[in-house]
Image: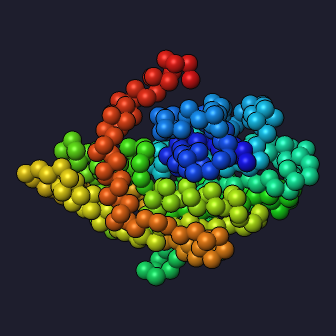
Amino acid sequence: MKLLITGGAGFIGSAVIRHIINNTKDEVVNLDKLTYAGNLESLSEVSGSERYAFEQVDICNRAEVDRVLAQHQPGAIMHLAAESHVDRSIDGPADFIETNIVGTYTLLEATRQYWQALEGDRKNDFRFHHISTDEVYGDLEGTSDLFTENTPYAPSSPYSASKASSDHLARAWHRTYGLPVLVTNCSNNYGPYHFPEKLIPLVILNALENKPLPVYGKGDQIRDWLYVEDHARALYRVVTDGKPGETYNIGGHNEKQNIEVVQTICDILQELRPQQTTYRDLITHVKDRPGHDLRYAIDAGKIQRELGWSPDETFETGIRKTVEWYLNNLDWCQRVQDGSYQRERLGAGV
């Protein structure tokens, strides 16, 4: 199978591509605009494969999307391209509306035209997999409730509202036009190659530089943490074995308060890179984010029952692997932090 993956230079997209190239015989076309969060260095271990191709294309550019579809003739599309940082969506929501809503609409329309022209098994086997977030559900009031595939949408931020909109579009294109759409909603991802603006890499890198470790409010916000390589396996399982029209929630079964996550990172760093004062001394509580959801938690029972997927990593094993990866790849982090990863690709004409 040949898969077109939008946003393949991003955190989750690059993990999906690495998984496919390293563990299957499938071909991958990576379509990515290369915004600040797109980093081709995350694909260095697989980019030399003859089964990998890259197209620098904005999903809002209909003519270019049409060209890529006609040229590469994919058998499935995995749509991960999205603006995804909540704080950025609060400061500047326009990019989130453009990419997450208009871009998804543009991609759906281009895909519909492409799919309708397919024949026989190629048309029957085609899939459009829309990858989304648990943030579309809002937050949970109780301590035992879980998000299911039937939980009503109640997004809280411009980011989650734009993703909710794109979910509705994808499902509408399935119901109205018959496009074979699959939707997945995942919990918080973490792991290697995570952009340093996100909580876990930010804490690791700030701690190594003895900078403050900012924690919103009391740090009592609860998230379900999913190791990105587990997520990549789940996404591939859905696009190959999932049933069109269905939604699958993907979670790590690892609920942790933000303050627990930060403290765990500090303790692992103290073990691996000991210093006289403890890393926990760097924790700094800051004013909470507007509209900050308190608790997310995923019921991933459906994907386990129907598709046989479950996470391999516990939070304890996954967070240790993550901290060790950052310690061993500080050069990658440095190029992201100083922006040289973007200057290098511009200099190379990418």
Residue at 49% over, 67% down = 311
Q: Is residue 346 above or below residue 336?
A: above
Quadrant location of the C terminus?
Answer: top right
Could you tell me if residue 53 is visible in this image?
yes
Q: Position of residue 196 (x, y in %)?
A: 38, 43
Colour scheme shown: rainbow
Q: Position of residue 331 (x, y in %)?
A: 33, 34
Tell me the quarter of the picture where residue 294 sits.
bottom left
Residue at 66% over, 61% down = 238
Q: Say left or right for 274 vs 78.
A: left
Residue at 25% over, 51% down = 213
Q: Say left or right for 170 vs 186.
A: right
Could you tell me if residue 62 is visible in this image?
no
- Figure label count: 0
Q: Position of residue 70 (x, y in %)?
A: 81, 35
Q: Position of residue 191 (x, y in %)?
A: 42, 53
Residue at 50% over, 24% down = 345
Tell me the quarter of the picture where residue 99 sits.
top right
